[in-house]
């Protein structure tokens, strides 16, 4: 084998994989960034092994690639036929690469299918994105930029994004397929979870959110439908399609409301540009409420009526909806669902710490005692009592002062 500069070797290898459609340029960039991260940490890593670990190549493909790439360029091209049967085409259409098996779901942005990746021989979730013709180019740019955020995330409880792009004027996103059901489907089929199980699910999702926050990324649409539970009971957070980076430019439309009203923080109700890390903490509290009760914190006839309640009203206490839950979990939910972001958990990490403490039978450190919750709720629910009490107190104080002055003048 000829001596190669390591950096040039890696760049040549990645370029080769892109040209032969083993993976996209976005995937190559993500792989290279992950490789550099590990190098900076002093870890010795083979980039092809890393590609297998991240799901970009099969082990067989990586082995064949490594063998062929150590030879000269003419041999590389000759040996490529052993890597894929579609080498005669520089690009594969979606239908050539992915065989659609069935529809998994659909929403405002598109349809998600269970598909079979015929190149890597694995099941994937393929999302075809539907954009309105009006401002399509702007929407396309926004989708691609925001989807690239999701592609930078690699966590045990986050659904992995394998590829994003556009082929034949069709935007698409290829994701890890989780065989199981969403938390929403689980609740619909089996009813509310017991406290221990709900805590277990939210700890896993909370850790995923905390990881994303450490990367500067807000999810903005945490809900039951976006929490997937596999057959072993492991939970995954999906669909970072509305995610945004806290620092740097935001590609959300000005004034646009993004997210699901039932789990949306008050500050998101009028513009998703106002979403912060605390908004995700609020949504996590809403999800915990939902897992434990089988109902949303706020309900209404339509999205607007729900949004108005989110902004103006207090959610019911857990104990008002379901008996038998601990006071501690009620306090945790209450703290998450505070209207003022400053009164919520300072971070998703703090929330996870309380959830873990409660799960293991310890007293949570950050939540408020239940008696404080009740007192605060009472006064918030009866604001006129504050005014009445203040007036009565003022009258009493004035009377005492007046009596004291009268006695003083009498002498």
Image (tube, rainbow, N blue to C red):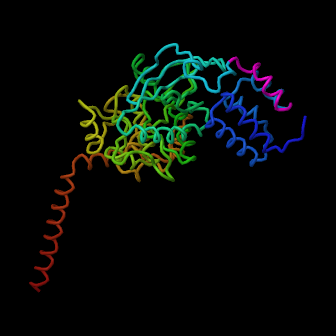
Is 391 covered by the magenta stretch? Answer: no
The reply, left or right, for residue 223 in relation to residue 320 is right
Quadrant that contains the N terminus? top right
Q: Foreground residue, 124 or 382? A: 124
Task: Using the rendered image of the protein, determine whether residue 200 is visible from the camera's viewpoint.
Answer: no
Q: Foreground residue, 289 or 106? A: 106
Quadrant that contains the C terminus? bottom left
The reply, left or right, for residue 144 in relation to residue 42 is left
Q: Residue at x 42, y 24 (%)?
A: 184
Q: Foreground residue, 60 or 3? A: 3
- The outermost residue toward the top is 101
Residue 98 coordinates in the image, percent (x, y): 57, 19
Residue 291 coordinates in the image, percent (x, y): 42, 28
Majority secondary structure in the magenta region: helix
Q: Residue at x 71, y 28 (%)?
A: 52
Q: Which residues are magenta?
A: 71-85
How many numbered tags mark residues here? 0
The reply, left or right, for residue 340 in relation to residue 49 is left
- The outermost residue toward the bottom is 411
Is 83 covered by the magenta stretch? Answer: yes
Residue 373 coordinates in the image, percent (x, y): 36, 45
Residue 286 coordinates in the image, percent (x, y): 39, 36
């Amino acid at each position: 084998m000829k001596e190669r500069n390591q950096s040039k070797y890696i760049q040549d290898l990645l370029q080769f994989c892109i040209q032969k459609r083993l993976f996209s340029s976005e995937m190559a960039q993500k792989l290279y960034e992950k490789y550099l991260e590990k190098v900076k940490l002093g870890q010795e890593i083979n980039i092809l092994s890393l590609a297998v670990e991240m799901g970009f190549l099969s082990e067989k493909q990586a082995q064949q690639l490594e063998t062929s790439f150590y030879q000269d360029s003419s041999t590389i091209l000759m040996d490529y036929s052993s890597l894929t049967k579609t080498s005669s085409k520089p690009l594969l259409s979606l239908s050539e690469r992915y065989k659609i098996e069935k529809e998994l779901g659909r929403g405002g942005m598109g349809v998600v299918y269970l598909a079979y990746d015929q190149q890597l021989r694995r099941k994937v979730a393929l999302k075809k994105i539907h954009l309105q013709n009006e401002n399509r180019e702007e929407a396309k740019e926004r989708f691609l930029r925001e989807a690239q955020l999701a592609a930078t995330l690699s966590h045990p409880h986050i659904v992995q994004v394998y590829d994003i792009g556009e082929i034949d004027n069709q935007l698409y996103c290829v994701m890890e397929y989780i065989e199981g059901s969403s938390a929403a489907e689980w609740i619909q089929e089996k009813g509310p979870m017991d406290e221990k199980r709900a805590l277990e699910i939210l700890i896993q999702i909370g850790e995923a959110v905390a990881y994303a926050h450490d990367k500067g990324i807000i999810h903005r649409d945490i809900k039951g439908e976006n929490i997937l539970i596999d057959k072993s009971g492991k939970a995954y957070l999906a669909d970072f399609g509305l995610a945004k980076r806290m620092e740097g430019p935001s590609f959300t439309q000005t004034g646009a409301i993004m997210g699901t009203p039932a789990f949306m923080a008050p500050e998101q109700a009028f513009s998703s540009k106002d979403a912060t890390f605390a908004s995700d903490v609020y949504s996590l509290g809403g999800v915990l409420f939902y897992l434990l009760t089988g109902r949303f914190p706020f309900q209404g006839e339509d999205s607007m009526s729900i949004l108005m309640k989110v902004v103006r009203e207090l959610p019911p206490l857990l104990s008002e909806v379901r008996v038998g839950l601990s006071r501690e979990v009620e306090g945790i939910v209450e703290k998450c669902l505070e209207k003022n972001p400053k009164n919520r958990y300072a971070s998703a990490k703090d929330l996870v710490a309380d959830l873990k403490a409660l799960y293991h039978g310890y007293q949570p450190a950050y939540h408020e005692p239940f008696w404080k919750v009740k007192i605060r709720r009472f006064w918030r629910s009866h604001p006129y009592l504050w005014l009445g009490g203040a007036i009565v107190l003022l009258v009493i104080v004035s009377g005492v002062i007046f009596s004291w002055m009268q006695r003083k003048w009498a002498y």
